[in-house]
Image (cartoon, rainbow, N blue to C red):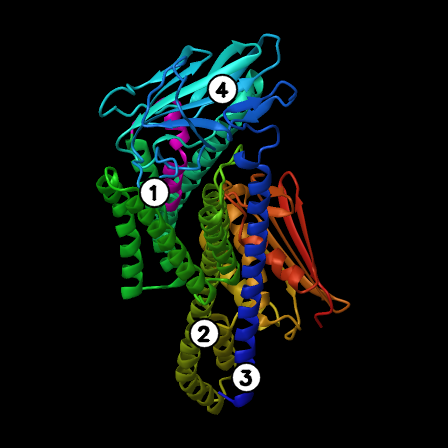
């Protein structure tokens, strides 16, 4: 390689990496901007409206139909207090989600056990119907509104309460005030008590909010499952892309399993849904890692190590929480930090290898890089955000994971289409090559026969000359005349069939004339082409071959007495004119300028190939499908 070439290659590499870096920065900035907007406008901790303070939320002058009960809650750790029994009790004031359990700021406090939460809401004096969202409360709970029990899930008084976690909506009528009292107990889960702020407001507003979340979850689950099943079938049908398609279908399957937990909680479920949620998320990461290695050509030990680490994290998501359920708060926090670190390290490696990858097309690399960056930023934001819980549109990692699936689905779909188009073009080239081989074989047969006949004629010529000399010497002129006349009538001088002066056209026409005799298709040839054309000989052969092949295939579907194929070709004022006519059965479709075949589903190759070749050479292509006769004409300008 010369020095100039080497410098050019280095410049091209730098240019490619610069484009990828710009893409990376653009995706990161756009993703951060999107999540910042969500953090500001779709966050329960920044929800507009009046917030509670010191156990009281005053909504008497608030006209918003929806509020989020985040701030100002009273909490009584390790106590179960019924309504009317709060006199003399000293509360702590918290916002929901401030702590993951019942420790209430005490580093040495027990996150498990029980607690009572209370919030007094001041309402307008008239009686109205209100709705309270029932969030996930770990792991058994009792709820009172104005001293009346409205929800009982599990037994909070049990030493080891069975999990009974359910989401939904509670409706009640109130005027002037609504005292909310929640008792919660938990001994085994890594969250305890109330950690998710509930929505409160009019029945329609709360119902619409819950319905919107349900619709979002259904869209994600159904779309992911549908895409996964579709690509699973594509993988089964396509041998070359089978591994990638199956891995991508697993990505979709595990993601759908991860995001469907709200559906389980609507109907009530135990701890197994949380184990499924955690396990499916880390299996989702494992499938992403395996698919990434396949797309980027990472093989051998690096691939096995990366997949093994992800699979080990998936296993740990099942085993470690079970070991830490009765452990200290510090151990739980350390485990959480470890998982966040693992995810960020994993995606740093994925993004780096995708950035320097050379295996895929630039489009696929860009989509893969964008998807990985989106998930990485989502993980970082979700881990670093001080307090966040979505009101309507879900967690960042779920949205980023769904976007990742859509991006890769689009990239793999276009790659599949491109591979199918390449295979189709290869099949067409193979068909054309077989046709060319058949032409050469037929011409070789005719040439061999002509050479053999010529050899025989030369061999016999000596005998004829001897006979002629003898008759001449004997002056038997009448006998000589009869001999010459008999020789002329009996000789079968085989000549090379010349149907036109152009060798490429002559070869194609000779082949199809022989096929016409075999298929019993009347073939009328009116071709007068010069020996030299500007159009390359093989292109001319492809044009004539495709036109005659389609005409023959249409004729073979007809009864023998209706078959007919005619070909006209000439040059006029330097332009090449070709027309092929044939009888046909009328089965033909042209849709959106595309020619559809009757031989198979999808676009036809033969006539489409002719049309593409004509348009590529600046010519014109015409179809005239009459009732009985199908006509194809083309013009190529300035060919002589």
Q: Which residue is mark 3?
A: 7
| Contact, mark 2 vs mark 3 (Cβ under 8 Å) | no
Q: Nearer the viewer, residue 9 or 315?
A: 315
User: In this image, 529 relative to 195: left or right?
Assistant: right
Classify mark 3: residues with Cα within 10 Å, few (<14), some (14-19) or many (20+): few
Q: Position of residue 59 (x, y in %)?
A: 60, 21
The numbered mark, 1 or 4, whose residue comes first in the sequence reads 1
Which one is in front in this view, the residue at disc 4 or the one at disc 2? 4
**Which mark is drawn over residue 197?**
none
Q: Position of residue 235 (x, y in %)?
A: 37, 48
Secondary structure of residue under mark 2:
helix
The Cα atoms of the two marked residues, 1 and 4, are separated by 32 Å
Q: Residue furthest bottom?
A: 473
The numbered mark, 2 or 3, whose residue comes first in the sequence reads 3
Q: Quadrant of the C terminus?
A: bottom right
The Cα atoms of the two marked residues, 1 and 2, are separated by 99 Å
Q: Residue at (47%, 76%) from the top-left corner? A: 487
**Which mark is drawn over residue 132?**
4
Q: Which residue is mark 2?
A: 447
Which one is in front in this view, the residue at disc 4 or the one at disc 3? 4
Secondary structure of residue under mark 3:
helix
The Cα atoms of the two marked residues, 1 and 3, are separated by 61 Å
The numbered mark, 1 or 2, whose residue comes first in the sequence reads 1
Q: Which residue is mark 1?
A: 107
Secondary structure of residue under mark 4:
strand
Task: Determine which quarter of the picture holds residue 612.
Answer: bottom right
**Residues in magenta, as a range:** 251-270
Q: Residue at (41%, 32%) from the top-left corner? A: 195
């Amino acid at each position: 390689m010369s020095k100039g070439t080497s410098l050019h290659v280095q410049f091209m590499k730098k240019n490619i990496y610069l484009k990828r870096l710009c893409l990376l920065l653009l995706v990161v900035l756009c993703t951060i901007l999107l999540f910042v907007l969500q953090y500001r406008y779709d966050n329960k901790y920044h929800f507009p409206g009046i917030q509670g303070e010191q156990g009281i939320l005053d909504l008497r002058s608030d006209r918003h139909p929806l509020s989020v009960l985040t701030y100002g809650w009273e909490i009584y750790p390790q106590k179960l207090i019924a309504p009317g029994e709060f006199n003399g009790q000293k509360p702590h004031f918290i916002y929901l989600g401030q702590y993951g359990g019942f420790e209430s700021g005490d580093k040495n406090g027990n996150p498990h056990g029980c607690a009572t939460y209370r919030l007094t809401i001041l309402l307008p004096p008239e009686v109205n119907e209100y709705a309270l969202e029932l969030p996930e409360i770990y792991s058994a709970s009792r709820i009172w509104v104005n001293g009346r029990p409205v929800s009982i899930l599990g037994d909070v008084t049990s030493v080891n309460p069975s999990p009974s976690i359910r989401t939904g909506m509670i409706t009640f009528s109130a005027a002037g005030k609504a005292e909310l009292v929640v008792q919660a107990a938990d001994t085994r889960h890594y969250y305890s008590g109330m950690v998710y702020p509930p929505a409160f407001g009019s029945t329609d507003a709360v119902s619409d909010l819950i319905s919107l979340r349900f619709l979002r979850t259904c869209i994600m689950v159904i779309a992911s499952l549908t895409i996964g099943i579709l690509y699973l079938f594509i993988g089964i049908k396509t041998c070359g892309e089978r591994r990638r398609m199956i891995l991508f279908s697993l990505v979709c399957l595990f993601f759908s399993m991860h995001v469907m937990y709200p559906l389980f909680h609507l109907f009530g479920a135990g701890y197994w849904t949380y184990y499924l949620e955690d396990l499916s998320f880390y299996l989702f990461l494992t499938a992403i890692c395996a698919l990434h290695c396949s797309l980027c050509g990472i093989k051998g030990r690096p691939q096995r190590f990366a997949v093994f680490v992800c699979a080990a994290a998936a296993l740990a998501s099942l085993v470690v929480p079970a070991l830490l359920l009765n452990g200290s708060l510090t151990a739980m926090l350390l485990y959480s930090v470890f998982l966040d670190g693992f995810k960020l390290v994993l995606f740093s490696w994925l993004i780096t290898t995708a950035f320097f990858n050379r295996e895929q097309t630039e489009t696929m690399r860009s989509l893969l890089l964008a998807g990985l960056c989106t998930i990485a930023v989502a993980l970082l934001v979700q881990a670093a955000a001080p307090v966040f819980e979505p009101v309507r549109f879900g967690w960042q990692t779920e949205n980023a994971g769904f976007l990742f699936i859509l991006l890769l689905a689009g990239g793999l779909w276009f790659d599949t289409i491109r591979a199918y188009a390449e295979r189709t073009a290869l099949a067409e080239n193979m068909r054309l090559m077989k046709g060319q081989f058949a032409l050469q074989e037929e011409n070789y047969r005719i040439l061999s026969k002509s050479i053999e006949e010529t050899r025989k004629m030369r061999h016999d010529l000596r005998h004829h000359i001897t006979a002629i000399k003898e008759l001449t010497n004997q002056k038997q002129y009448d006998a000589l005349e009869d001999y010459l006349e008999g020789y002329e009538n009996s000789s079968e001088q085989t000549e090379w069939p010349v149907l036109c002066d152009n060798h490429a056209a002559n070869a194609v026409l000779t082949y199809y004339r022989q096929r016409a005799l075999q298929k019993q298709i009347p073939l009328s040839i009116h071709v007068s082409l010069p020996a030299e054309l500007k159009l390359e000989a093989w292109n001319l052969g492809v044009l004539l071959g495709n036109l005659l092949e389609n005409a023959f295939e249409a004729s073979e579907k007809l009864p023998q007495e209706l078959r007919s194929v005619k070909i006209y070709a000439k040059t006029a004022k330097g332009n090449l004119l070709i027309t092929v006519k044939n009888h046909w059965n009328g089965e033909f479709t042209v849709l959106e300028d595309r020619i559809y075949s009757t031989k198979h589903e999808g676009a036809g190759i033969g006539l489409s190939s002719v049309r593409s070749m004509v348009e590529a050479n600046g010519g014109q292509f015409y179809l005239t499908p009459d009732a009985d006769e199908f006509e194809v004409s083309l013009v190529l300008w300035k060919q002589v």
